[in-house]
Amino acid sequence: LARAAAQRAVHDPGAPIDAFALETMGHVPDFAAAGDPFAGRRISASELEALGACPTRWFYGYLLRARPPQDAQFEPFAWLDARRQGDVLHAVFERVGREVIAGALDLRDREPATARALALLDDRLADVARELPPPSDWIRDVERDALAETLRRWVAAEGEALADGATWLEVEADIDGRTVRLGDVDVAVRGRIDRVDRLPDGSLRVVDYKTTRRGASKYFGKDGRHLRGGRLVQPLLYALALAAARGAPVGAFEYRFPFAGPPFGTRRLDAATLDAAATRLVPTLVAQLRTGAFLPTDDDADCGWCDAADICRNRSEGFGTSAPRAAWTKARVAGDEPLLVPLVRRRAGEALA
């Protein structure tokens, strides 16, 4: 009966939004009465971004902790997946950063800096190969050459960026356990910052490397002012945590995309944008948790990659995704259902009334 009701709720746009339909689609009123959802927990940026993208994703992934099976698969024509490539690059970024901060390396002297980065890359790949042997020497060399080209662009771009007068202060800066204020609650943060710079005016800059091959424009979207309707909470969370940890204002947050190029991709959020998000957007995420409304996103683009895709019966179709639950929400966001108000206003960059 429950499955039949869920199918009716998804596939019948004219179905009434009664209490049972809402519960089927993700309204859990008992959760709202359970107390502070952040009490005794450290919250990562990815968790809040999951809530901002799709409350249903947060419900399955972080409340129920449902995970799809992670079966190891042998790929005869590939060695490192996107996650492992990102791990390798981040390891090199960290080692190079520590040497820059110690004064042992100058990225503006491009040739020796590049040689050092490539040597660190080879060391790291040798470590990985001992744990995960490549399918062949040819595949190893092809993937190594692609990572090496990324590092060449990275050294060149970071060396040129030093002309703005910024000083590298820290890499892998620990903000784990730092408490920040979101709305009217205190939240303990979990995470590390790829790099912290000091700008010429004395303020700090957070730099986060995204090794996705999707590029800056696709990741950041067109709505940076509103942090993509809550899908991009990391800049705000890290800026607040760093300011609390170091006792200095954060003047900017920058995403840098080593795979995006040429040119090297960078997206910047200034302090004014982060302040507006802190007061107008992020509190709606906290408020939504208190309603127990974990209703689906209204945008099937949020469903392209999700651990709950099988649960929600999503299917890839051409260059997009067929997401029945997202279609259910989209058909109702123009109505007067109060449980959808936080999602609608967050996507519009508005605060709750």
Image: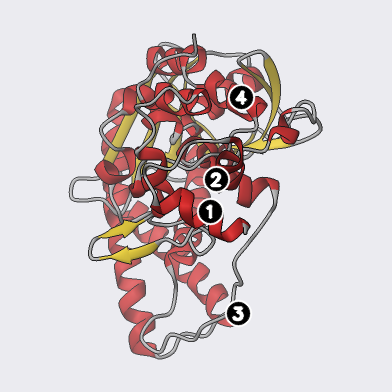
Alpha-carbon span between mark 2 and mark 1: 7 Å
Residue bearing mark 3: 131
Above or below: residue 270 compared with residue 54: above
Residue 6's label in the rendered image is 1
Three-letter code for the amino acid on which mark 2 is drawn: Met
Three-letter code for the amino acid on which mark 1 is drawn: Ala
User: Depth-wise, is mark 2 or mark 4 nearer the camera?
Assistant: 2
Q: Nearer the viewer, residue 158 or 84?
A: 84
Alpha-carbon span between mark 3 and mark 2: 43 Å
Above or below: residue 332 compared with residue 82: above
Residue bearing mark 4: 286
Q: Residues within 10 Å of mark 1 (few under 14, many from 20)?
A: some
Alpha-carbon span between mark 4 and mark 3: 41 Å
Give left or right: position of 111 versus 130. left
**Cβ–Cβ under 8 Å for marks 2 and 4:** no
- Tag 3 or tag 4, which sits nearer the N-term? 3
Alpha-carbon span between mark 1 and mark 4: 27 Å
Instruction: Name the residue at 30% across, 68% down.
Output: 146
Q: Nearer the viewer, residue 14 or 205?
A: 14
- Tag 4 or tag 1, which sits nearer the N-term? 1
